Image: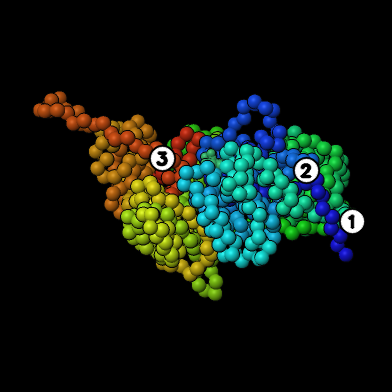
Amino acid sequence: MKKTNRNEKIRNIAIIAHVDHGKTTLVDAMFRQSGLFRPGLEVDERIMDSMDLERERGITIAAKNCSVQWNGVKINIIDTPGHADFGGEVERALSMADGAILLVDASEGPLPQTRFVLKKTFEKGLKVVVVINKIDRKDARPDQILDEIYDLFIDLDADGEQLDFPYLYAIGREGIAKKTLAEKSDDLHLLFETILNEIPAPEYDPEEPFQMLVSDLGYSDYLGRLAIGRISNGKAEFHDTMVCINDNGEHLPLKISKLQVYDGMNLKEVDAAEPGDIVVLSGIEDVKIGDTICTKEYPKPLKRITVDEPTISMEFTINTSPLSGKEGKIVQSGKIRERLIKETLKNVAVRFEQTEDRERFIVKGRGEFQMAILIETMRREGFELSVGRPKVIYKHLNGTLLEPIETLFVDCDEHFLGIVTEKLSIRKGRLTNLVNNQSGRIRAEFSIPSRALIGYRDEFLTDTKGTGIMNTLFAGYEPFRGDFPTRFTGSIVSDRQGNSVAYALYHLEPRGRLFIVPGEPVYAGMIVGEHNKTVDISANPSKEKKLTNMRAAGKDESTVCSPVQPMTLERAINFIKDDEMVEVTPQSIRLYKKTLSVKKRKYKNELN
Ligand SMILES: Nc1nc2c(ncn2[C@@H]2O[C@H](COP(=O)(O)OP(=O)(O)OP(=O)(O)O)[C@@H](O)[C@H]2O)c(=O)[nH]1
Ligand SMILES: [Mg+2]
């Protein structure tokens, strides 16, 4: 019979929430109050957001481990991202946790990603502690939010025990948690106590030998590949010989060359690690997330981590534009391929496919923002490449074409509902719910194809004068709803190579919105702006004014061009159509037609 002990010296928790509800900020406060920083030490905000892109964008991209000590118990914490595109990170993080802290903003309440992460926690059968955070907000409505959280639990079929969830109110930024709103509190001791009392200590079978599921990978220049995971059973010691069972069932030998555990944000070397603890183990190169590390004598694989399927795919190729190879350090297809495969090792939600063409790859993931982050990371590493439009992944079932559908939640001023509904219905969206809370704002829910939302966010913000909030939740696959245009405007395309000049751009301005400024290099097929009408037009952005020796009567027309909104990677990949590509280099983002020559494009169009 299976015996179960619990390692009472450890708790493993994941902090989960919708984006921006304050997870990483709460971890800061937990660090401060568990005595991790010496008093008076200046510490950055959101210290767990350590990647450059995380700091620049103020969001968490990858789930990360750390730990704090409270009353002799080590709490391993996994801070997770709240953005829907990084949902795979939450699924991965939960494989190391025995419970979760669900943060809910006291004003915004449960939002789509709150539902997603809570559902994943229930699927794993993990205990949840609810924290209603940011109760200092002027528009906080904590009582109402608590009701909404109950409703969400009920909606997700929570059983009686789950419905009796422990909850706290908090101001994470000030490091305060309390049981009732009236109560006075100036620290987080109630949160720490609740974690110790409510989250079960990790369970293990004392008779089973060592077993660990690899939930994350790291890399160190000295140690090579690092395998990170929670020890399910048994003990590990420095120099132990083990095996790693991979997805083919092969047993790869390994000798633990270093054993580390989390100590605050850092790693601490140890000689031995106990069951239930989260460890970082080195000694094997060929290891993947989902593999099991166990003893050679009793090799028993644990259930591999499963994550939701990708819903979006994108084409990655070498940069073939006439300006290629001038700005990037890494341009070869082999290197791009290697880098993309490396990404799939660490990022469980990303898939890689080689096409028949050696220089063309397909990358699949959860959303275009996740793709943009990957591409941005690569360009910072010195890569130069081209990418196509993000496309949704279709499925076939019994001869029916199925497409991914999202539930879109819109919160906006009631005056804008008309325009939003109109735009969404052109894109095959259906209004499924509408709540008018009499405050002048409405909350509407739409069922809409995922492909309709690629590039829609910018338009939504323009239509709601920047005041609308939209959130999406993947709802599943449904029969294809039919075609609709992906963009309602054409492109202004350069017909030759040269350098753009103010005179030409000034005269192009009335035709649409330009992407380039005078002095930029252009080439035939490069997209220099968005045309007001649905068709593409060709133009010569390097056309100089004809010089005459006759002075024109009156004032010379001014050629001061209007300011241009810089083309960001996200805007670019959301803008392009199927026959267009984005050229990405460490310095530039340029858009171009897949067929560069205007003659060949015309010929192709005539054929179609
Ligand atoms: N008013 C108020 N704001 C807070 C509080 N805690 C965090 N914030 C603010 O909320 C914003 C988001 O905080 P983060 O800690 O980055 O949120 P997050 O949940 O980690 O975000 P993601 O990881 O990107 O999902 C920041 O501007 C914080 O300063 C709080 O207790 N009260
Ligand atoms: Mg965060």
State the image coordinates of residue 276 (x, y, percent, origin top left). 79, 49
* Distance in Å between CA atoms under marks 2 and 3: 50 Å
Please state which of the two labelled residues, at mark 2 or mark 3, is closer to the viewer. 2
Question: Could you tell whether 265 is left or right of 510 in the image?
Answer: right
Which residue has dot 3 on it?
567
Question: Relative to the observer, which residue lies in front, 101 or 511?
Answer: 101
**x 51%, y 45%: residue:** 372
Question: Could you tell whether 195 is left or right of 25 in the image?
Answer: right
Q: Label 1 sits on what residue type?
A: Glu
Secondary structure of the residue carrying numbered label 3: loop
Q: Are marks 2 and 3 in contact (CB under 8 Å)?
A: no
Which residue has dot 2 on it?
73
Query: Is residue 215 at least partly visible in the picture?
Result: no
Q: Label 2 sits on what residue type?
A: Val
Question: Could you tell whether 118 is left or right of 563 in the image?
Answer: right
* Distance in Å between CA atoms under marks 3 and 1: 60 Å
Q: Residue furthest bottom?
A: 398
Question: Relative to the observer, which residue lies in front, 10 or 261?
Answer: 10
Secondary structure of the residue carrying numbered label 1: loop
Q: How is the image coloured?
A: rainbow
State the image coordinates of residue 460 (x, y, percent, origin top left). 38, 52
**x 76%, y 45%: residue:** 278
Q: Are marks 3 and 1 in contact (CB under 8 Å)?
A: no
Query: Is residue 69 at least partly visible in the picture?
Result: yes
**x 69%, y 57%: residue:** 126
For residue 451, above or below residue 515: below
For residue 69, above or below residue 483: above
Q: Label 3 sits on what residue type?
A: Met
Quarter occupied by residue 156:
bottom right
Q: Residues within 10 Å of mark 3 (few under 14, many from 20)?
A: some
**x 63%, y 52%: residue:** 167
State the image coordinates of residue 74 (x, y, percent, origin top left). 76, 42
